[in-house]
Amino acid sequence: MNHISHWIGGAERAGTSGRVGPVFNPATGEQSARVDLASAAEVAEAVAVARAAAGQWRSASLSQRSAVVFKFRELLAQRAGELAAIITAEHGKVLADAAGEVARGLENVEFATGVPHLMKGGFSEQAATGVDVYSIRQPLGVVAGITPFNFPAMVPLWMCATAIATGNAFVLKPSEKDPSAALWLARLWAEAGLPAGVFTVVNGDKEAVDALLAHPDIAAVSFVGSTPIARYIYETGTAHGKRVQALGGAKNHMIVLPDAELDAAADAAISAGYGAAGERCMAISVVVAVGEIADPLVEAIAARLPRIRVGAGTEAGVDMGPLISAEHRDRVAGYIEAGASAGAAVIADGRKADDLPEEGFFLGATLLDNVTPEMTVYTDEIFGPVLSVVRVRTYAEAVALVNDNEYGNGVAIFTRDGGAARRFQFEVDAGMVGVNVPIPVPVAYYSFGGWKASLFGDSHMYGPDGIRFYTRGKVVTSRWPDPGTSAIDLGFPQTR
Ligand code: NAD
């Protein structure tokens, strides 16, 4: 059985805590590996190595740093298929989807290659007579990333490319459910010429996370995961004086107005609802059907369901892979039961899908109609292939529904009315809005982040916010006076 350890000081390092966790192949249900779970002492050792490396790395010139990121980009582009296969083996998503995850992560690396431009400061000549003022941005030191199982490569890439390019050392604590992608990235960084210690992987669970949150040499923490843990990370990290950005869970709505293009809306609902078996923070989990489009829309979505082929992510022609674990599959199945008992109309029941493979953590696509806001299938993030349809009469009711929801990650509107779409973009309380786009994940030169319980902190991830998050500003006021003009002046400095 595969044994997955840590990456410290530029090399693999076996764990010493004596604690390990199981890693499964979700398509077979079999354990494929065991992963070392770091103790607080191992985390401290990793941080010490990272701290020493950070001191050197921040002195590397911008062009040296960007050259390493360029090389990493080249290697990643060449070997994207290798990484996609690793993702599929431990996460279960289909290979094409895993390749899409790598492609989106690659965009963040490409953004970070522009670091010399992105870290430029400002300069004001002659702010006062003979005085110039300029601003610079400097790295924080050692920063940590704590990432979820559902994007084992993309989310670490959201963080590490920018953190490293800006001159920090980055310590990654990946999900213990699919940790191999992180180790693969570590080897790639080494091959790209990144000095040892600048990229570190400590595998682990709560113990390792808590050690990072309390460690005085960790200056900032980037977190992506579920809302209760995101809140905990934010509160604990900031209580320890750290800069924290903590992205949480979601319940993304797709509003379909009566004038929407029906087929396009139904296709989008299927793709965004069931892609990656619903295990995406930007998955659509609620379709809000406005007015008379509800019946034809539900019919159009239902008619497409039999086309979704469920199976191992490695098999050609498969659209939807398994869920991450047996427990999670059972939890999602429990929501289907709860929805049915609460009065939702079960149009398709994924538990009863007839093409489900016998082994592995599979569940078919479920469609629930006539879902109402007090049902748990509506209130809770299910994170599985369950799409709920809520019927409302008006646009105003649809927006009120979204704005009353606890979460505010992504949201989409489907309409042919530009005025309605513009009004929606103005009124809706969510961080990422799609207009006839069901999964509006921002491109790498914007930043990614939700509102409300989907993000704790004030900084979104990657893009311009990422550059700001991983650096701090310094303003220099400078004068090169003629010694002959020097005089004592106890007044407060003025610019005039
Ligand atoms: P999770 O919150 O269970 O785990 C995320 C990370 O936190 C993992 O590294 C895990 O080891 C660690 N962790 C778990 N429990 C902990 C605890 N008690 N104390 C300290 N650390 C702990 O999330 P997950 O199940 O891996 O991922 C799915 C969740 O992530 C969903 O809620 C999804 O919406 C969310 N997500 C959000 C975004 C976003 O951008 N907002 C993106 C991807 C995933």
Image: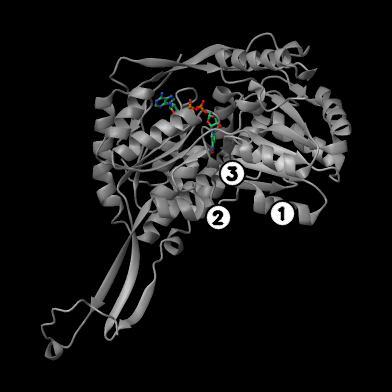
| Residue 331: numbered disc | none
Q: Nearer the viewer, residue 260 or 258?
A: 258
The residue indicated by pointer 2 is: 445
Q: Is residue 342 above or below residue 170?
A: above
Tag 3: amino acid: Arg
Distance from the alpha carbon under mark 1 to that under mark 2: 25 Å
What residue is rendered at 82% in x and 41% in y? 264
Q: Position of residue 396 (x, y in %)?
A: 74, 44
Whether residue 315 appears in this view of the structure is: yes
Tag 1: amino acid: Arg
Q: Secondary structure at mark 1?
A: helix
What residue is rendered at 42% in x and 55% in y? 468
Q: Nearer the viewer, mark 1 or mark 2?
A: 1
The residue indicated by pointer 3 is: 104
In the image, farthest residue toward the left: 488
- Mark 2 / mark 3, whichever is N-terminal: 3
> Would you say the residues marked 1 and 3 are in contact, meaning their CB atoms lie under 8 Å apart?
no
